[in-house]
Amino acid sequence: MKIGRNDLCFCGSGKKYKKCCLGRELPGELKHKTHDILPDRWEIDYGEPCLDKDFFDHNGLAEFSAARMIQAAMLFPDAVEEVASEVRLETTGYLAELKEIEELTRPQEIVRFLKKGPDRLNYPQVLDKFLDHEKETVLLLLEEMRSSDNELFVEWAVKLFYESDYVLAEDILEIIELHQHDAYAVSLLCILLGSYDHPAIPKLLWDYFQYFRKNFRDELYHEGPLLALREIHEYMNEPRVSDPEMALWDEDRLATFDEKELVARMKALGVPLDKETFLKDIQGLHAAEKLVDRWVEKYSIHSVGNDEDFLWFGAMELWKRWAPEVMFDERLSDMMQRGYDCFNRRKNREGCDLWLEVWEVFKARHAGHGRSLEGVDKQYSGSQTWHNWCQDLEMNLGNLVRVCPEYAPRAVTYFREFRLLLPESDPLIVQNMMMAEAEALIFGGDLVAGEALFRKVVESFSDDVWGYIRWGDVFASSMWSSLVPQDLTKAEKIYRMAIGRGLKEEKEVNRRIRDMGETRQAHKNDRIGSRLLK
C-alpha cells in the first residue's frame, strides 16, 4: 500500500492523511513508503539560492542515478535507439511491444499504454507516436500527472514533456506546487525545469535540492534539482563560441574595435571610408552583404582570405554604429535567431516580444511592396526566411495567449496585419492566421468576436475540416485557458457541424467526438466513486 498526504488516512477516520495521522508512527507495512510523502510546497523554504562556483564544486553528481539516466534519455534519444537496436537482436520481447506501439492511433490509447509502463528502450518509437498527436496527448498527460503515483509513467511523461512545444514552465510548476507530492516524481520534474526560463524556477530547485539532501540521505532525489541548477548555471555562464567557418573574424571581436581602427582597416583593404561616404553607400540597401558587393564594384578591393570576412563583419558593425535606425537583413536575422533561442529555453514572453519588434520592421519595409510571403522572401538577404518565421510567430503567439491572455490584443493585431499586408500568401497560411486570431480573441475574453471569426473561417474555407476542429477544440479542454471553461456539449455541437460535408479529414472530427465520450464516462465514473467513498 502506498499513502500520500491527500489519501484517506490508514486509521479509518475518513479524513485525509495530512489532516489526521501525518507525523505519527506509521504501521510497519507503510514505513518503507514514507519517502513518498512531501510537505506542501510552501513548507519548504531554504532562503535565497546561492548558485556560485563553491556550491557546484561542493555538490558533485553520483556516477549513476535515476535522474542522470532520465536526463540522458531526454537529451540523447538517438543513443537510446542505438542501444535498443542492439538489444532487439537478442530478444523477441521487444517486438510484441513495438507492434502494440505501431497500432496506437489516439491520444487516449497512448496515455493508457504509458500507464502500463512500457520498456524504456522503446522511447524513440513512443516519441514518434506522441509527436503525431502532441497537442491532445499533452493535455491528457498533464491531467494524469496531477494525481499519478506511477513512477514509470512519471518518467515517460517527463521525457515527452521535454520534447513538446505545448508544455510551459507554468504547467510543471503548477503540478509540483499544487498537486504532486511524490519525492521521486518531483525530482524528475525538477530536471525538466532546467530547460525553462521562469523567475520562480531557481528558488524552487534550490529548496527541493536542500530538502531532498537533508531528508533523504539514502536516496538520490536531490540530483534532479541539482542537474537542473547545473544546466541553468552553465547556460547563464556559457561563453559565446564563434562559428569556426568565420575563422578569424566574427561579430563579437569586431564589436571590441574602436571606430578609428575599423575605418583604418577598411581603408587598408581599398575602401576609402568615412561616415558620410558610408551613409551614401547604404542608400537603397537593406543588407551588409549587398553593401560589400557595392564596394567591390565601386572600389579596387584587394582582400584575400579572412579579409573578405572582415569586410562583411566590419560593414555590419559600422552600420550598427553609424546608422542604427536603418535595420539591415543580417541584424534582423540575428533578432529572429535570438527569438528561436528564447523559445528553445522556454523564454516565451521574451521571444514573442522580440519577434513583434521584428514584425514592426517588416511592416515598415514591405508594406505595399509585396502581397505574399513568397514575394517578400525574394527581396530578403538574411539567413532566415519570412515564410517560416511568420508561421512560427503565429504558433508561439498562439501558445502564449493561452496562458498569458494579456498578450491577446498584440496577437490579434499581428494576425490581422498579416492578412492585410500579405493576402496572397498560401491560402493555408492565411486560414491558420484567421483561426489563430479567432482563438486569441476567445482566450483574451472576447467570445462573441472569436466565434464570429470562426464562422467566417468555416464559410471561407468550406472544403477544410480544421476550422471546425480548432473551433471545437477551444471548448473541449479545461486546460487551454482559465477564461474559457470546458464545455463538451458545445464542443461536440461544433464538431458535428463538419459531419456529412464530405470533408477530407472528417475522421479527425469523429475521433474527437469518441474521445469526448470517453471523457464524459470517466467523469461519470469519478462522480460515482466519490459518492461511494462518502
Image (cartoon, rainbow, N blue to C red):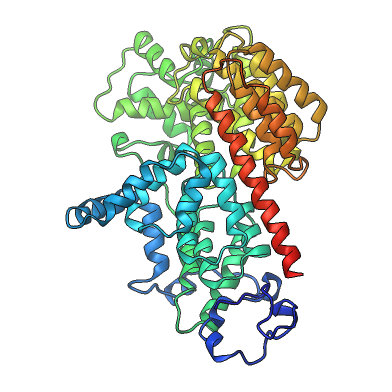
Q: Residue at x 53, y 63 (%)?
A: 190
Res 503 → quadrant: top right
Q: Residue at x 64, y 46 (%)?
A: 519
Location of residue 31 in the rendering, given as x and y in whole percent from the top left corner: 54, 87
Front residue of this view, candidates 382 and 494: 494
Location of residue 268 in the rendering, given as x and y in whole percent from the top left corner: 33, 25
Whether residue 415 sits left or right of residue 290 in the image: it is: right
Whether residue 496 sits left or right of residue 120 in the image: it is: right
Q: Residue at x 61, y 70 (%)?
A: 181
Q: Quadrant of the N terminus?
A: bottom right
Res 485 → quadrant: top right
Placement of 448 over or under 171, stated as above or below: above
Q: Quadrant of the C terminus?
A: bottom right
Whether residue 392 sits left or right of residue 241 in the image: it is: right
Whether residue 256 is visible here, answered yes or no, is no
Front residue of this view, candidates 133 and 330: 133
Location of residue 243 in the rendering, given as x and y in whole percent from the top left corner: 34, 39
Placement of 246 over or under 217, stated as above or below: above
Residue found at the very far left of the displayed protein: 90
Res 211 → quadrant: bottom right
Placement of 144 over or under 501, stated as above or below: below
Front residue of this view, candidates 27 and 152: 27
Front residue of this view, candidates 126 and 277: 126
